[in-house]
Image: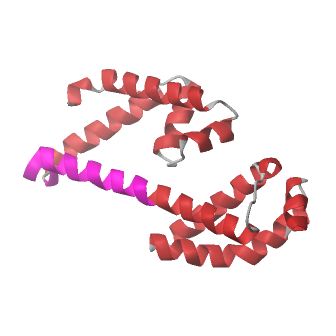
Amino acid sequence: MENTIGQLREGDHRAYEAVFKSWYAPLCSYACSMLRCMDEAEDVVQKMFCVLWDQRAELDVRISLQSYLYRAVHNRCLNRLKHEKVREKYKADVAHRHGEAYDSADGQMAHDELAAAVEGAVAQLPEQCRIVFELSRKEALTYPEIAERLKISHNTVENHISKALRVLREKLKEFT
């Protein structure tokens, strides 16, 4: 195992391919048991393998590669579930605020108008700020994951998210 980890750290494509072939299906099954959706499970596992390759030089396996892979998938699944819970809570809150009108044509029109306004406001954000915001909200990446992907500091990610939220609150205040 130590040899495989060393090979991965050195960028050995064959070692990576062997790990991928050995663990992809079992990790997908595990993720599916948590997420209850094979498409989402495959997405989580694929992203985990991409991050594994991108961060191979810093690979810090303390127990076993198997434990490391399962823990990484487990954490990504928990993040996905947490993000989905937030999304559902938001939908319920919007439905509650708009009551029965939310399901009506007027409610749907108001929802579409808000969605278009949000999309337009996000598009107007400065490029790096927009990218960070979209990685956080659309891809449900954590701040450390965004920082690593974009090669920026965790504080920079926090600053971009704060700025994006401040700008969006200002641009969307008519909807509150």
Residue at x 83% of width, y 64% of height:
16
- Placement of the C terminus among the 4 image quadrants: top left
Examine the rendering and report whether any part of residue 38 can be seen: no
Q: Quadrant of residue 110?
A: top left
In terms of secondary structure, what is the magenta stretch mainly?
Answer: helix
> Which residues make up the magenta segment?
81-103
Question: Which residue, as the protein is rendered here, is positioned at the far front?
Answer: 63
Q: Is residue 77 magenta?
A: no
Depicted 175 relative to depicted 21: above or below = above
Q: Is residue 18 shown left or right of residue 68?
A: right
Depicted 121 relative to depicted 26: above or below = above
Q: Is residue 15 shown left or right of residue 84?
A: right
Depicted 141 relative to depicted 173: above or below = below
The image position of residue 134, as x and y in percent, is 50, 39
The image position of residue 49, as x and y in percent, is 70, 60
- Placement of the N terminus among the 4 image quadrants: bottom right
- Colour style of the rendered protein structure: secondary structure
Residue at x 59% of width, y 68% of height:
42
Residue at x 75% of width, y 59% of height:
61
The image position of residue 175, as x and y in percent, is 22, 30
Q: Is residue 93 magenta?
A: yes
